Every structure is written in structure tokens, then in C-alpha cells.
Amino acid sequence: MARLKGSVGAETKVAILSTALPMIAQYGYSAVSMRQIAEAVGVNVSALYNHFPNKQQILLRLMIDHMDSLMAAWDNQDIRGKTAQEQLEIFTRFHIRFNVEKPKAVFISFMELRSLEPEGHKTIEKQRRVYEDILRDIIRSGINSGVFHTSDAHVAAMSVLGSLNGVNTWFRAEGRMSQKEIEDTYVDLTLRSVGYEIKGT
Amino acid sequence: MARLKGSVGAETKVAILSTALPMIAQYGYSAVSMRQIAEAVGVNVSALYNHFPNKQQILLRLMIDHMDSLMAAWDNQDIRGKTAQEQLEIFTRFHIRFNVEKPKAVFISFMELRSLEPEGHKTIEKQRRVYEDILRDIIRSGINSGVFHTSDAHVAAMSVLGSLNGVNTWFRAEGRMSQKEIEDTYVDLTLRSVGYEIKGT
DNA sequence: TAATTAAATGAACGTTCGTTCTTATAATAA
DNA sequence: TTATTATAAGAACGAACGTTCATTTAATTA
């Protein structure tokens, strides 16, 4: 009928995003309809268009927000003055923690790249590359300072990211390992993979 | 109108699968319509139903065939009597090669698990676990024989698989590295990650 | 050769899709 | 207080969806 008492646009917008996120993560962008999102939010379909010009912009907003929050979280890590092996450990723990905390947003950012129209795709790809470069630079500095022994910093970075991203595919909070144990194990795997010699082996 | 001269059911079935594969890989299962598949194959939509009872079965067939071909290809690898480090090297090269050769089928098997109905999902998950166990057992045997030093064979296997699966996200045949160089680099990263000490470092 | 089966077409089914338009009213600005 | 803007509902748009059906004819079997 008409505007509802107490309705606030900004709140509805947030509700749309937080409702759409798990739905898209579970069923995929094109399998989730605007009507399904609207029903889950508790509004009429047409109300969605007061906050987003179209469906595509909902997905794009989810992905941009995710990448922004990833970069912001990384900026809170303090790696100044640390050795390359310390930095790589920090990155490893950070990446696992972030992925485990936001599995659905991570999943979407990975799976729905192909659902983005060219412009949005480019935007996200660029943000992703910035993040990858952080890791690559850490590895490169370790090679330069002689503590890492691996032939190609870029390939090593891709390998490490693949390894870490895999955690979300099998990690369950109620599993046999605590998150700390998992982090410890991955720190070990990661440092060794780039040829860092862990004392005592 | 009617059956066409020279039409053979088995050929059309293969054509449907090989046509649908790249389309689903690019746009996603639910974003690709039966009409789009039919048009690409060059038949009427309804003809698809002479060969598959519904859309879901096309996806399931693609994924089952992929997993079968993966397992068959692995069975052609001869690892009898080899050391754990040799077996891990064989697995690494095998996995990269297979993934690079069939990037689209690999992509679908990874991305469209969620698009499978429960029964099919269970089938594919089971096949996937069999494959993962191959790697886990190799790593476990290396730990037992004392050549690998890593705390958890299962986690290590997941890490290695994640690392190797990542290759498809960035590998381009026309890139700066040949496939052999990439394989060599990953063999190094993989063996090191599980704590195998490569001579000469 | 006759009967049956396989493989295709095209029309049609009801449903759902993303989106737009009109209208109503709450909240805010002038 | 009045005018404007923001936020919602609901009806409706044409298009597309997966699937079914009747029909036709080629290929195969009896």
C-alpha cells in the first residue's frame, strides 16, 4: 500500500544485503530470484528497487563490501619491522581467520565473479590483485633476504593462497581440530612450502 | 517436424554434453537454459528430452563423467614400488596436468556441487573423497617412512589439493612459464610443504 | 515387407523471471 | 503548516523458464 511506520531506508538496504548474502552463497546468484530475496527480507519485490537499481547491483555491492572489509582488516595487521617469515605467519593466520569468519562472503567472491558484468568484474579483479600482491611481496622479500628458497614469488603466492582458500571447503568449527591447531598446521605447511627452514626438523 | 535423415541418438547425446559443458562452465548451471543448450547444439529444445529426462541429469552426467575420467586417468599412473616422495611428485604432476587439460570440467565439478540435488551430490562427494584419499595415503606413508615431516596427513592433503587446484585460476598456456616449469615449481612447493628435505638447499 | 522403435519438430502448458508503473503514506525540509 | 521527498505495496509488463504433448519420419527389428 504505502510507506510503513518506522521504515528507514538505510536499515532496509542493510537487511537486503545481509539477507541476500547467505541465499546467494547457498544457491548461486542466478538461482536466487528478487522475489525470494524480498520475501526473506519481508518486503514486496518492488521495494528492493527503492534501494538497488537492479539485481546485479546487489551482487556487486556484496562483493565490493567484502573486498573492502578484507583490505581494511589487513590494514589493521602490523607487519612493520617484522621478518619475512614473521610476516608470512601473520598473513597465513590472518587469511585463515578472515575466511573462517566470513565463509559465505568469501564463497560468493570466489564463485560469482563470472556473474558480474564486465565493469564490476574488473573492479573486483583489481581489488583481488592488490591483496595477492601483499602476499607476493612478502614472499619476494623473504627470497631477497635469503630466508625463503623458492624459484618464483608469484607462483608461490598463488600456491599459498590456493592452499589457504581450501580451508573453507573442509573446516567445521565442531571438527576434531581447533582453529588454532589448524592455523598452526598451515603456518608450518606454508613456511615450509616456500623453503623456509624451520628449526628442529 | 520429424526425425532427421542421418540423426543418431548416441551422437546427439554426446553433442549435448560437450556443448553444455563450456556453457555451464562459463555462465553457471542455473544461468544456462535448456533452450540455449538446444540452440547451441542445433536442435529443438524438446529434442533434449529424448536423451536426458531433465536438466539436472545433464549436469549430473557431466560431473560423473568427469570424476570417472579423473579416476581412470589416475589408475593409469604407476606408483607401485615408488617412494612416498616419488609418488607425491607423480601425483602433483598428474593433478596439474589433468586440471590444465580439462579446466572447464574441473571448474564445473568444483562450482556446481551446490546445484546438484541431494542424491547426485552424495554420489559426487563420494567420488571426490576417494580421490582425496589417494593423496592423503601418499602423505601418510611418507610420514610413516620418515621422509615427510608434517603433523597431519589429512590437513596436508587438503592444503596440497588447494594449492594445486589454484593453478587453473591463473594458468594461461601463453603465459611466461611453460607447463613443465609450472609443474617443476609445484613439485618443489608441494614436497617442501610436507616437510620433505630437498637436497641442495 | 510390415511393425516397431528412435529421434526429431513445433506448439503449448503453467510458472516464474527482472523490472516498471501507479498509488499511498510516513518522514523530513521549507 | 505546507511541500517535498523517501519508502513502501501491489498490479502489471513482456520475456523466458523447464517440461509435456502430439505428430512426423528415419532407422531398426520381426
Image (tube, coloured by chain):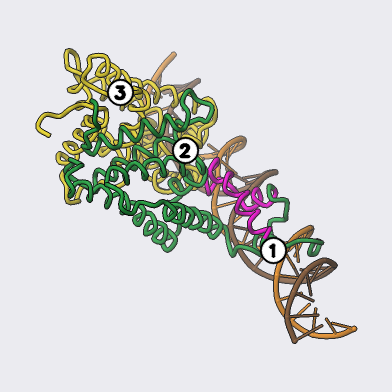
Chain colours: A green, B yellow, C brown, D orange
Asked if residue A195 lies left or right of residue A90, the reply is left
Using the image, name the chain to which the residue with label 3 belongs. B
Identify the residue position indicated by label 1 in the image.
A9
Q: Is residue A28 left or right of residue B178?
A: right
Residue found farthest to the left = B200
SS under mark 3: helix
Residue A95 or residue A38, whichever sits in front: A95
Residue extent of the magenta highlight: A11-39
User: Which residue bears the numbered disc 2?
Assistant: B48
Q: Position of residue A144 (x, y in %)?
A: 17, 50
Please say whether residue A37 is one of the residues in the magenta stretch.
yes
Q: Are marks 1 and 2 on the same chain?
A: no
Circle 1 Cα neighbour tier, 10 Å, few/some/many (<14 / 14–19 / ≥20): few
Query: Badges 2 and 3: C-beta atoms under 8 Å apart?
Result: no
Q: Residue at x 60, y 62 (%)?
A: A52
Q: Are marks 1 and 3 in contact (CB under 8 Å)?
A: no
Residue B135: give its label. Answer: 3
User: Please, what secondary structure does the residue beneath circle 1 have?
Assistant: helix
- Whether residue B51 is visible to the viewer of this picture, yes or no, is no
Q: Amino acid at mark 1?
A: Gly
Instruction: Say if residue A17 shows up in the picture.
Output: yes
* Magenta region, main secondary structure: helix
Q: Residue at x 54, y 60 (%)?
A: A57
Viewer-proximal residue among B177 and B4: B177
Magenta-drawn stretch contains A163: no
Q: Which quadrant of the figure contains the C terminus of chain A?
A: top left
Residue count near mark 2 (Cα–Cα under 10 Å), binned few <14, some 14–19, many ≥20: many
Disc 3 marks which amino acid?
Leu
